[in-house]
Image (spheres, helix red, strand yellow):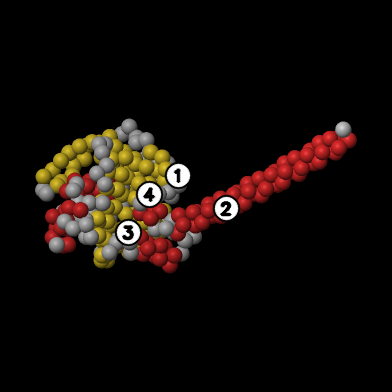
Amino acid sequence: MRSGGRTGKQLMGVFIFILLTGLILSGCSVQDTHTANEGNGSEQQSSIAESPDNVEEGTDNEEENIIPSSEVKDLTWKSEGVPYTEPFKLIDASHLPFTTYIPEEDWTAISIDNGVVFKFKHNGQIKVVFLDKGTTQQDAEQYFQKIVNQYPEIYEEKDDTQSWVILSYHMYDKTKGDVEYWKYADAILGERNNQYLIIIWGMDNFEYAEVFYPMVKVVFKQWRWRDTDELLGILVLKSFAKWKEKLT
Protein backbone atom coordinates (compact mmCIF):
# COMPACT_ATOMS: atom_id res chain seq x y z
CA MET A 1 0.00 0.00 0.00
CA ARG A 2 2.82 2.39 0.84
CA SER A 3 4.44 1.58 -2.45
CA GLY A 4 1.12 2.26 -4.18
CA GLY A 5 0.82 5.59 -2.34
CA ARG A 6 4.29 6.65 -3.41
CA THR A 7 3.52 5.61 -6.97
CA GLY A 8 0.29 7.64 -6.94
CA LYS A 9 2.10 10.68 -5.63
CA GLN A 10 4.84 10.26 -8.22
CA LEU A 11 2.29 10.01 -10.99
CA MET A 12 0.50 13.09 -9.67
CA GLY A 13 3.79 14.99 -9.60
CA VAL A 14 4.55 14.00 -13.20
CA PHE A 15 1.05 15.07 -14.26
CA ILE A 16 1.40 18.47 -12.59
CA PHE A 17 4.86 18.93 -14.15
CA ILE A 18 3.50 18.14 -17.62
CA LEU A 19 0.54 20.46 -17.10
CA LEU A 20 2.71 23.37 -15.96
CA THR A 21 5.14 22.80 -18.83
CA GLY A 22 2.27 22.85 -21.33
CA LEU A 23 0.90 26.09 -19.92
CA ILE A 24 4.32 27.76 -20.07
CA LEU A 25 4.90 26.65 -23.66
CA SER A 26 1.38 27.74 -24.64
CA GLY A 27 1.98 31.18 -23.16
CA CYS A 28 5.25 31.51 -25.06
CA SER A 29 3.52 30.48 -28.27
CA VAL A 30 0.76 33.08 -27.78
CA GLN A 31 3.31 35.78 -26.99
CA ASP A 32 5.43 34.90 -30.02
CA THR A 33 2.38 34.87 -32.29
CA HIS A 34 1.24 38.23 -30.96
CA THR A 35 4.71 39.69 -31.51
CA ALA A 36 4.82 38.31 -35.05
CA ASN A 37 1.39 39.76 -35.82
CA GLU A 38 2.48 43.14 -34.50
CA GLY A 39 5.51 43.01 -36.75
CA ASN A 40 3.45 42.08 -39.80
CA GLY A 41 1.01 44.86 -39.08
CA SER A 42 3.81 47.39 -38.86
CA GLU A 43 5.24 46.22 -42.16
CA GLN A 44 1.84 46.34 -43.82
CA GLN A 45 1.14 49.88 -42.63
CA SER A 46 4.53 51.01 -43.88
CA SER A 47 3.90 49.40 -47.27
CA ILE A 48 0.51 51.05 -47.60
CA ALA A 49 1.88 54.44 -46.61
CA GLU A 50 4.76 54.26 -49.07
CA SER A 51 2.97 52.69 -52.02
CA PRO A 52 1.80 55.07 -54.76
CA ASP A 53 -0.99 52.56 -55.43
CA ASN A 54 -2.62 53.88 -52.30
CA VAL A 55 -3.27 57.12 -54.14
CA GLU A 56 -3.96 55.83 -57.62
CA GLU A 57 -5.98 52.70 -57.09
CA GLY A 58 -8.19 53.67 -54.19
CA THR A 59 -6.91 51.21 -51.59
CA ASP A 60 -7.33 53.53 -48.61
CA ASN A 61 -8.25 51.93 -45.31
CA GLU A 62 -11.49 53.81 -44.74
CA GLU A 63 -13.99 54.00 -47.60
CA GLU A 64 -17.70 54.67 -47.66
CA ASN A 65 -20.18 55.70 -50.28
CA ILE A 66 -21.14 59.35 -50.31
CA ILE A 67 -24.88 59.83 -50.36
CA PRO A 68 -25.53 62.37 -53.12
CA SER A 69 -27.59 65.46 -52.46
CA SER A 70 -31.17 65.36 -53.64
CA GLU A 71 -30.25 68.22 -55.97
CA VAL A 72 -30.08 67.05 -59.58
CA LYS A 73 -29.70 69.07 -62.75
CA ASP A 74 -29.53 68.24 -66.43
CA LEU A 75 -26.14 68.76 -68.01
CA THR A 76 -24.92 68.20 -71.54
CA TRP A 77 -21.79 66.44 -72.72
CA LYS A 78 -20.64 65.68 -76.26
CA SER A 79 -19.17 62.56 -77.76
CA GLU A 80 -17.75 62.82 -81.28
CA GLY A 81 -19.70 66.03 -81.73
CA VAL A 82 -23.06 64.56 -80.72
CA PRO A 83 -24.67 66.21 -77.63
CA TYR A 84 -26.20 64.10 -74.85
CA THR A 85 -28.18 65.54 -71.94
CA GLU A 86 -28.74 63.61 -68.73
CA PRO A 87 -29.22 64.22 -64.99
CA PHE A 88 -26.17 64.86 -62.82
CA LYS A 89 -26.30 64.60 -59.01
CA LEU A 90 -24.70 67.07 -56.63
CA ILE A 91 -21.80 65.82 -54.51
CA ASP A 92 -21.60 68.01 -51.44
CA ALA A 93 -19.63 66.09 -48.80
CA SER A 94 -18.64 68.04 -45.70
CA HIS A 95 -15.06 66.66 -45.62
CA LEU A 96 -14.32 67.96 -49.13
CA PRO A 97 -13.29 71.57 -49.82
CA PHE A 98 -15.23 71.55 -53.10
CA THR A 99 -18.55 70.53 -54.62
CA THR A 100 -19.31 69.12 -58.04
CA TYR A 101 -21.81 67.06 -60.02
CA ILE A 102 -21.42 63.52 -61.33
CA PRO A 103 -23.73 61.59 -63.68
CA GLU A 104 -26.69 60.08 -61.87
CA GLU A 105 -26.37 56.79 -63.78
CA ASP A 106 -23.32 54.48 -63.68
CA TRP A 107 -21.30 56.73 -61.33
CA THR A 108 -20.71 56.56 -57.57
CA ALA A 109 -18.80 58.76 -55.13
CA ILE A 110 -16.68 57.05 -52.50
CA SER A 111 -15.31 58.92 -49.52
CA ILE A 112 -11.76 58.07 -48.45
CA ASP A 113 -9.85 59.36 -45.46
CA ASN A 114 -7.84 61.82 -47.56
CA GLY A 115 -10.19 62.68 -50.40
CA VAL A 116 -12.71 61.12 -52.75
CA VAL A 117 -13.03 58.69 -55.65
CA PHE A 118 -15.63 59.14 -58.38
CA LYS A 119 -16.07 55.73 -60.00
CA PHE A 120 -17.48 55.05 -63.45
CA LYS A 121 -18.70 51.44 -63.57
CA HIS A 122 -16.96 50.74 -66.87
CA ASN A 123 -13.37 50.71 -65.55
CA GLY A 124 -12.90 54.44 -65.13
CA GLN A 125 -12.41 56.74 -62.17
CA ILE A 126 -11.44 60.18 -60.94
CA LYS A 127 -9.46 60.26 -57.72
CA VAL A 128 -8.74 63.36 -55.66
CA VAL A 129 -6.23 63.11 -52.82
CA PHE A 130 -5.18 65.86 -50.42
CA LEU A 131 -1.72 65.33 -48.96
CA ASP A 132 -1.12 66.04 -45.30
CA LYS A 133 -0.66 69.69 -44.44
CA GLY A 134 3.00 70.37 -43.79
CA THR A 135 4.13 68.13 -46.66
CA THR A 136 7.01 69.83 -48.47
CA GLN A 137 6.89 70.43 -52.21
CA GLN A 138 9.89 68.15 -52.67
CA ASP A 139 8.14 65.26 -50.88
CA ALA A 140 4.91 65.92 -52.78
CA GLU A 141 6.72 65.87 -56.12
CA GLN A 142 8.61 62.68 -55.25
CA TYR A 143 5.39 60.94 -54.24
CA PHE A 144 3.68 62.18 -57.39
CA GLN A 145 6.51 60.91 -59.59
CA LYS A 146 6.16 57.42 -58.06
CA ILE A 147 2.56 57.37 -59.26
CA VAL A 148 3.42 58.62 -62.74
CA ASN A 149 6.34 56.24 -63.16
CA GLN A 150 4.07 53.21 -62.82
CA TYR A 151 3.16 53.71 -66.48
CA PRO A 152 5.62 52.60 -69.18
CA GLU A 153 5.13 55.75 -71.26
CA ILE A 154 4.57 59.27 -69.95
CA TYR A 155 4.84 62.80 -71.21
CA GLU A 156 4.45 66.12 -69.52
CA GLU A 157 1.57 68.44 -70.33
CA LYS A 158 2.24 72.15 -69.94
CA ASP A 159 -0.60 74.36 -68.72
CA ASP A 160 0.46 77.89 -67.89
CA THR A 161 -3.14 79.07 -67.51
CA GLN A 162 -3.54 77.54 -64.05
CA SER A 163 -1.13 78.96 -61.49
CA TRP A 164 -1.99 76.32 -58.88
CA VAL A 165 -0.90 73.41 -61.13
CA ILE A 166 2.70 72.35 -60.42
CA LEU A 167 3.02 69.24 -62.62
CA SER A 168 0.73 67.61 -65.17
CA TYR A 169 1.26 64.34 -67.06
CA HIS A 170 -0.40 62.02 -69.55
CA MET A 171 0.45 58.36 -68.88
CA TYR A 172 -0.43 55.23 -70.83
CA ASP A 173 0.32 51.55 -71.06
CA LYS A 174 0.15 49.99 -74.54
CA THR A 175 1.38 46.54 -73.54
CA LYS A 176 -2.04 44.90 -74.02
CA GLY A 177 -2.03 45.29 -77.80
CA ASP A 178 -4.93 47.04 -79.53
CA VAL A 179 -5.71 50.63 -78.57
CA GLU A 180 -9.07 49.60 -77.09
CA TYR A 181 -7.20 47.76 -74.33
CA TRP A 182 -4.63 50.40 -73.46
CA LYS A 183 -4.55 51.78 -69.95
CA TYR A 184 -4.54 55.54 -69.78
CA ALA A 185 -4.51 58.24 -67.11
CA ASP A 186 -3.94 61.93 -66.54
CA ALA A 187 -2.37 63.14 -63.32
CA ILE A 188 -2.01 66.60 -61.83
CA LEU A 189 -0.08 67.77 -58.79
CA GLY A 190 -1.28 71.11 -57.50
CA GLU A 191 -1.15 73.34 -54.46
CA ARG A 192 -3.94 75.34 -52.90
CA ASN A 193 -4.14 77.08 -49.53
CA ASN A 194 -0.72 75.71 -48.59
CA GLN A 195 -1.82 72.11 -49.16
CA TYR A 196 -0.82 69.82 -52.02
CA LEU A 197 -3.38 67.79 -53.90
CA ILE A 198 -3.26 65.11 -56.57
CA ILE A 199 -5.99 64.58 -59.17
CA ILE A 200 -5.90 61.45 -61.32
CA TRP A 201 -8.44 60.34 -63.89
CA GLY A 202 -8.23 57.48 -66.33
CA MET A 203 -9.45 54.10 -67.54
CA ASP A 204 -8.21 50.53 -67.57
CA ASN A 205 -9.22 50.29 -71.24
CA PHE A 206 -10.64 52.50 -73.95
CA GLU A 207 -13.90 50.64 -74.58
CA TYR A 208 -16.03 53.40 -73.04
CA ALA A 209 -13.58 56.27 -73.46
CA GLU A 210 -15.84 58.22 -75.82
CA VAL A 211 -18.32 58.42 -72.93
CA PHE A 212 -15.98 58.67 -69.96
CA TYR A 213 -13.80 61.60 -70.99
CA PRO A 214 -16.61 63.99 -71.98
CA MET A 215 -18.28 63.21 -68.63
CA VAL A 216 -15.03 63.91 -66.78
CA LYS A 217 -14.93 67.26 -68.49
CA VAL A 218 -18.40 68.09 -67.11
CA VAL A 219 -17.43 66.94 -63.59
CA PHE A 220 -14.42 69.26 -63.63
CA LYS A 221 -16.41 72.09 -65.17
CA GLN A 222 -18.93 71.87 -62.31
CA TRP A 223 -16.20 71.74 -59.62
CA ARG A 224 -16.32 74.77 -57.32
CA TRP A 225 -14.14 75.53 -54.31
CA ARG A 226 -16.20 76.17 -51.21
CA ASP A 227 -14.22 79.11 -49.87
CA THR A 228 -14.11 81.19 -53.05
CA ASP A 229 -16.73 79.63 -55.36
CA GLU A 230 -14.03 79.52 -58.03
CA LEU A 231 -14.02 76.86 -60.73
CA LEU A 232 -11.33 74.19 -60.89
CA GLY A 233 -10.36 75.26 -64.40
CA ILE A 234 -8.09 72.38 -65.49
CA LEU A 235 -7.92 71.30 -69.10
CA VAL A 236 -9.38 67.94 -70.10
CA LEU A 237 -8.84 66.10 -73.35
CA LYS A 238 -11.39 67.49 -75.79
CA SER A 239 -11.74 64.47 -78.02
CA PHE A 240 -10.94 60.78 -77.61
CA ALA A 241 -10.31 60.59 -81.34
CA LYS A 242 -7.57 63.23 -81.05
CA TRP A 243 -6.00 61.33 -78.17
CA LYS A 244 -5.96 58.07 -80.18
CA GLU A 245 -4.37 59.96 -83.05
CA LYS A 246 -1.61 61.13 -80.70
CA LEU A 247 -0.74 57.62 -79.56
CA THR A 248 -0.94 55.66 -82.79
Q: Is residue 164 visible?
A: no
First along the sequence among labels 2 and 4: 2
Helix, strand or loop under label 3: strand
Question: Separation of disc 1 and disc 2 at Cα?
Answer: 24 Å
- Would residue 221 be found to the left or right of residue 39 on screen? left
In this figure, which residue is indicated by the disc labeled 4? Answer: 58
Helix, strand or loop under label 2: helix
Q: Is 171 or 137 nearer to us in this picture?
A: 171
In this figure, which residue is indicated by the disc labeled 2? Answer: 36
In this figure, which residue is indicated by the disc labeled 3? Answer: 188
Question: Separation of disc 1 and disc 3 at Cα?
Answer: 23 Å
* Kind of residue at disc 1: Glu
Residue 167: quarter of image? bottom left
Question: Separation of disc 1 and disc 4 at Cα?
Answer: 10 Å
In this figure, which residue is indicated by the disc labeled 1? Answer: 62
Give the label, 1 or 2, closer to the camera: 2
Question: Separation of disc 3 and disc 4 at Cα?
Answer: 16 Å
User: Residue at point 38% right, 55% down?
Assistant: 53
User: Residue at point 37% right, 49% down?
Assistant: 58
First along the sequence among labels 2 and 3: 2
Quadrant assignment for the C terminus: bottom left
* Kind of residue at disc 2: Ala
Give the label, 3 or 4, closer to the camera: 4
- The image shows residue 22 at horizontal and vertical percentages of 69, 44
- The image shows residue 182 at horizontal and vertical percentages of 21, 56
